[in-house]
Amino acid sequence: MQREITVAVDAMGGDYAPKEIIKGAVLAIQDRQDINIILVGKEDVIRNELNGYDYDKKRIIIINAEEVITNDEAPVMAIRRKKNSSVVVALNLVKNGEADAFVSAGSTGAVLAGGQLIVGRIEGVERPPLAPLIPTITGVSLLIDCGANVDARPSHLVQFAKMGSIYMENVIGIKKPRVAIVNIGTEEEKGNQLVKETYPLLKELTDINFIGSIEARDIPYGQADVIVCEAFVGNVILKLYEGLGTALIGKIKEGLMSTTRSKIGALLSKPALKNTLKAFDYSRYGGAPLLGLKGLVVKTHGNSKSNEIRNSILQCVTFTEQKINEKIKENLKS
């Protein structure tokens, strides 16, 4: 019998908190019977919002946290000063083994800093990377790192490649995932100093399937399963990816609604178009795990709606069941 997974959720973090966060939590327990939720935040606010739902009250509990960490606060200072914030209280639940995972759409800096300061790194992990799944025409790829380490060293990128491979093989089910490093060309001698120093190190590894460099234009075509880079490059790729996708979808809709003829064509093509665009909806894939911590910490977009919150909670189940942290720890030992 599968054990139940407990996920602590930051009910106060994100642009649409607490309404969309709580809705996502309710949807998650409706989807799966093996998930329990701890909503962390201002109890009266959470309870008032929950009153609008019919749900199994045994599977969602509330832990009060009166403080909220905002995006304009210095992350480390906020983590140290706001001990009764939803982020700090929830992270301590993971640290103390009262929750298997933590999900937040709140301050990225606070989640990253708190993850390392409170939950702590797995022994041997130099820098935990933030690793979201991004849609491609063939499925999904893992972009690692997209926001945690803007000044990474070659040894960090080597660990990113290893952790990314473990994640894609065990959570997504891709055997021998293809690993590539982001570069300005495919030739081995190209790149900045970081890429030039990292490339031969990745090439020497026998426990990953390294295929060389990948240019940004090839990422949407799914030419690699694990895309390795430092966080500055990764964040630029992620934001451009999301922004361009939203812009293109907007222009397509505008074009389809521009004339009577195009509206008729839109009506006829709607089912096929809907399925195609659905594959590139990043909210389907949940949040970005901060890999390499002693417990699972997942950061979702600040503008996450209920569907992304639900999927972020659901991905915690597979991560926990597949014992990703134990596999990372074992890999780094060898």
Image (tube, rainbow, N blue to C red):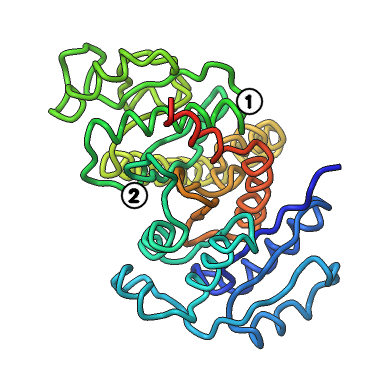
The residue indicated by pointer 2 is 148
Which residue is the extreme one toward the bottom?
44
**Is 9 placed left or right of 216 in the picture?**
right
Where does the image place residue 317, in percent across and percent down from the top left? 68, 46
Where does the image place residue 247, in percent across and percent down from the top left? 43, 45
Tell me which residue sits at (36%, 70%) in the image: 71
Residue 209 quadrant: top left
The three-letter code of the residue at mark 1 reads Gly
Q: Is residue 294 above or below residue 53?
A: above
Tell me which residue sits at (14%, 28%) in the image: 192
Between 140 and 280, the residue placed more toward the observer is 140
**Is 143 placed left or right of 100 in the picture?**
left
Q: Secondary structure at mark 1?
A: loop
Figure quadrant of the C terminus = top left
- Residue 69 circle label: none
Give neighbour class at mark 2: few <14, some 14-19, many 20+ (Cα, 10 Å): many
**Is 119 placed left or right of 314 in the picture?**
left
Tell me which residue sits at (34%, 48%) in the image: 147
The three-letter code of the residue at mark 2 reads Ala
Residue 52 quadrant: bottom right
Q: Is residue 246 above or below residue 272?
A: below
**Is 31 placed left or right of 328 in the picture?**
right
Tell me whether the residue at label 1 lies in contact with that at label 2, contact meaning CB atoms closer than 8 angstroms: no
Q: Is residue 247 visible in the rendered structure shown here?
A: no
Calculate the distance from the C-alpha at mark 1 to the C-alpha at mark 2. 25 Å
Q: Is residue 142 above or below residue 312?
A: above
Where does the image place residue 267, in percent across and percent down from the top left? 70, 39
Tell me which residue sits at (44%, 43%) in the image: 292
The residue indicated by pointer 1 is 173
